[in-house]
Amino acid sequence: MSGSMNVDDITVITSFSKKLYDDYGRLFLKTWLRHWPASVKVIVVSEDWGESDWERPPNSGHIEIRNLLEISPACTNFLLRHRENWRAHGKKVNEPHPWGKHPRRQKYNFRFDAYKFCRKVFAIQAVAHTCLPGRLYWIDADTYTDLQAIPSHIDGMLPPDRDVSFLGRPGYHSECGFIGYRLPEAIHFIDFFASLYDSDKVFELGQQHDSWVFDRVRETFSHLRYYDHNHSGEKHVRAFEDSPLGDFMIHLKGALKDDPDPEWVVATRRRRVLQDRANRKG
């Protein structure tokens, strides 16, 4: 594919709070500006982080900030409605769905934390309706671009004959640190996804975090054209780095994002990715 490929129809969306900007959002934006072409717009959606919290670099005109509670009344209403519903926060057992021993000890289970994960779903919906037609990529803010994002890489994140791209993990829920949507083809998918939270029907499902619900919505919208970046067909936690997205990005999941030196962690992960790929070839 040509390096002059047009990626002007692509918008990237991510989200973080004021606290998470300090934890990892700062490095997301720093590595974005270093390695992505300015023709790709990025929209940061946040409840409490804005222009006054950031010393905007001179080359960042293609980065836009939107307030989640202003652009999504449905999100505002959901958060108000469930502010003290501890089951919706994943902090109280939601019978008949078992927690298992470890979550019970921790007194928290992310699988049932609709209060946290609804923000991502509502943010995508609100932004998607402003990107018609085009391609919309969600990328988690604890993802860092450590190598140049060339146009062929970016274009390949959602192939031209597909409506939705994702990172599947057979026998487990998808890794939704990345999702690609073609618009308007996938707009009804996105609206239905958000409606499950807006109507509280999400609590009728087996789990409430966005990755599990995403897979249920895929089953409902089976007529759409999907592209799974997990070419191995295996269930593993490194689905992101082992996919073609790992050619230029590293996703620091779990405790890795809390390391005091994330740039060192990214460099270490990159060496591991390259070594693993060399071993598979050899």
Image (tube, helix red, strand yellow):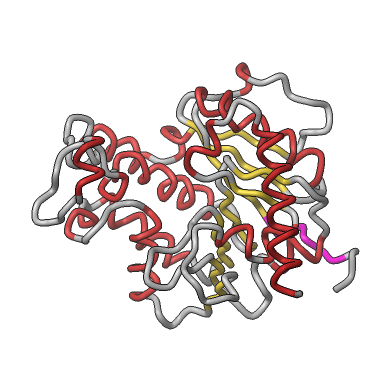
Quarter of the figure with the N terminus: bottom right
Bounds of the magenta span? 5-10
- What's the residue at 57%, 27% (across, down)? 21
On screen, residue 1 versus residue 175, left or right, reads right
- What's the residue at 60%, 32% (across, down)? 25
> Is 8 a magenta residue?
yes
- What's the residue at 65%, 28% (across, down)? 261
Most extreme residue toward the left is 96
Q: Could you say which is closer to the camera, residue 82 or residue 231?
A: 231
Q: How many numbered discs, if any?
A: 0
| Main secondary-structure element of the magenta-colored stretch | loop
Residue 278 higher or lower than 38, as above or below: below
The image position of residue 73, as x and y in percent, is: 36, 39
Most extreme residue toward the bottom is 223
Q: Could you say which is closer to the camera, residue 83 or residue 186?
A: 83
Q: Quadrant of residue 170?
A: bottom left
Residue 106 higher or lower than 53, as above or below: below
On screen, residue 204 versus residue 281, left or right, reads left
Q: Could you say which is closer to the camera, residue 237 or residue 217?
A: 237
The image position of residue 191, as x and y in percent, is: 39, 60
Quarter of the figure with the C terminus: bottom right
> Is 179 a magenta residue?
no
Q: Could you say which is closer to the camera, residue 198 or residue 142?
A: 142
The image position of residue 258, as x and y in percent, is: 53, 31
On screen, residue 147 versus residue 82, left or right, reads right
Residue 3 higher or lower than 139, as above or below: below
The image position of residue 108, as x and y in percent, is: 25, 38
- What's the residue at 33%, 35% (across, down)? 76
Residue 70 higher or lower than 42, as above or below: above
